[in-house]
């Protein structure tokens, strides 16, 4: 199982701080999360900042990043401010 942790506005929308789910890639994970929660789309999740085991997926293989048992994925809402 993959441990997923949510932060920011996405956490407030989902109303959970974390969950465990099976997925073999970041893309598959985001699709499964969007099906599990009403009002959350894959597009919403792709606008977030996503880390796998502490590394930004931009430095990995983006949404094609492979996931394995016991990985931790952190999903942060994008920040805005001034």
Image (tube, rainbow, N blue to C red):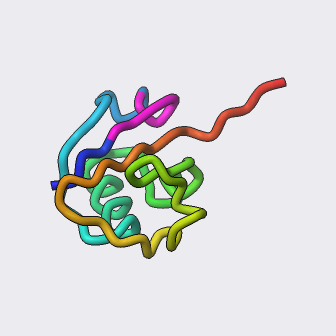
Q: Which residues are magenta?
A: 5-11
Residue at screen point 37% across, 59% down:
30
Q: Is residue 28 left or right of residue 61?
A: left
48 up-or-down from 35: above or below = above
Task: Count every numbered label the image shows and give the total.
Answer: 0
The residue nearer to you, when weighing 67 against 29, is 67
Residue 19 location (% of width, % of height)? 22, 40
Q: Quadrant of the N terminus?
A: bottom left
Q: Is residue 82 left or right of residue 49?
A: right
Q: Quadrant of residue 35?
A: bottom left
Residue 9 location (% of width, % of height)? 51, 30
Residue 39 location (% of width, % of height)? 41, 45
43 up-or-down from 74: above or below = below
The residue nearer to you, when weighing 50 against 42, is 50
Q: Quadrant of the C terminus?
A: top right
Q: Is residue 7 magenta?
A: yes
Q: Quadrant of residue 29?
A: bottom left
The residue nearer to you, when weighing 12 against 62, is 62
Q: Is residue 68 left or right of residue 26?
A: left
Residue at screen point 27% across, 35% down:
18
Residue 64 location (% of width, % of height)? 44, 75
Q: Is residue 57 magenta?
A: no
Residue at screen point 18% across, 46% down:
20
């Amino acid at each position: 199982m993959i441990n997923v942790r949510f932060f920011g506005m996405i956490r407030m929308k989902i109303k959970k701080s974390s969950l465990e789910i099976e997925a073999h890639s970041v893309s598959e994970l985001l699709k499964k999360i969007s099906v599990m929660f009403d009002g959350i789309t894959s597009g919403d999740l792709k606008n977030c900042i996503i880390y796998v085991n502490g590394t930004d997926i931009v430095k990995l293989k983006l949404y094609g990043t492979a996931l394995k048992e016991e990985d931790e994925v952190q999903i942060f809402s994008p920040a805005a401010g001034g």
